[in-house]
Image (spheres, rainbow, N blue to C red):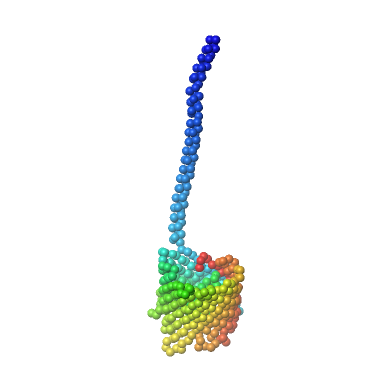
Amino acid sequence: MNISRAAAVMLVALLAASVPAFSLVAWAGPEDERLDRLEGELGILKKENAELKHRVETMETDDEQMRHDLGTVSKLVDVSGYAAAEFYHTDQDSENDRFRVRYLSLFFTKEVQRDWKLFTEIEYEDGPKVESNAATNTVKSSQGTIFVEQLYIEYHPSLDWDVRFGRVNTPAGIWSIYHYPPYVPFQTDPLFYKNVFPEVSDGIQLRNSFSSRESVVDTHLYVANGAGNPGSGDRNENKGVGARVNAELSGGVSAGASYYRERDNQDTTRRSFGLHLNASYNPWRFQTEYATRHNGPEGGVRSFNDSGWYAQLGYDIAKWTIAARYDWYDSNDTDAANDRFRTTGAINYHFASNVVGKLEYSRNEFDEPASKDYNEFIASIVVAIGDL
């Protein structure tokens, strides 16, 4: 009985001693789990914070690179242009069949400021090469042509008008402005082109566009040195003046007129006048120009006119273009046998929007008995680079 009592007392004492331990374990277990959970969440937050910091640093680096790239791009010049290579065949007695690296024209455009632009067109024709004689500072040999066809500084405060200072394609008719090989069906120019009106003009040009009776009217007015007189060597005090007007009418039709007057280095007064018409009715395209120039020499020499006209028709079907043109040019109307005629047919295939293959045939005829009629055939590939 005593042993049982003693055992019971010991059991009660042992239970009493165990109660705080069990109570501590029961209290500490959930708290430890809470702490572990908080430590885990803190670790996750630290990891996410590190990732966010890395992303911010990456974005700052990318932004710095972007600012650098944009700064670099803003200093660049837009480059575009075209190139043409061809094979030429003729039965003309004085000419041989040949492969021809005909054109490489590069256009450089730079928006200097919001209202100012620089534009340059440099043409390399027939693979030019110039070799100097070092001993005499003269040209040892040369071939081909390098020609700064356009170079002007443009002030354009609005879409309605701008002013150009420098060299421009003389604004006359259609072909003088829109003659780039990737976008015209022919490799040959109209016969009167560069004859009745000068090819380029060095001076100042004002362009203005406005609306009139639901038509858009585009005008050019310019003052220039005159034909054959670049700025460094203008050989007379006279200046040429010219104007062009073109009206966009309804139904895809536009029409206009051109005028130019100058007194050249031989004191000959030349007055040029032209009319043009352009019409598009998909898939047909038609354009025609007439130009004439009155030449009044000094010293009692008889005056004369030189005149030209052409009409061309084009038809587009899928990637093909079929075109025909008829040309006439009379270099002196006082000579009844001075007329020249040319009939041209062309087929274009557009391999891509900026790659064109061309086949072209021309028949050239003369009123002059001493000039023999002849035929020409041209096969060419033309490539456009960028926006012309």
Horizontal side, residue 153 vs residue 89: left or right: left
| Placement of the N terminus among the 4 image quadrants | top right
Judge by depth and name the residue closer to the eye, 228 or 195.
Answer: 195
Residue 108 shows in this picture: yes
Residue 183 figure quarter: bottom right
Give the x, y percent position of residue 9: 51, 14
Location of residue 168 in the rendering, given as x and y in whole percent from the top left corner:
45, 73
Q: Residue at x 44, y 70 (%)?
A: 160
Residue 71, relative to residue 171: is it above or below?
A: above
Q: Residue at x 49, y 70 (%)?
A: 123
Measured as percent of width and height from the top left, residue 43 is found at 48, 38
Q: State the residue in front, 9 or 169.
A: 9
**How many numbered discs?**
0
Query: Quick check: 370 above or below 83?
Result: below
Please, which residue is most extreme toward the left here?
Answer: 237
Which of the 4 image quarters holds residue 118? Answer: bottom left
Across and down, in percent, residue 345 comes to 60, 76
Image point 44% across, 64% down: which residue?
111
Q: Is residue 359 visible?
A: no
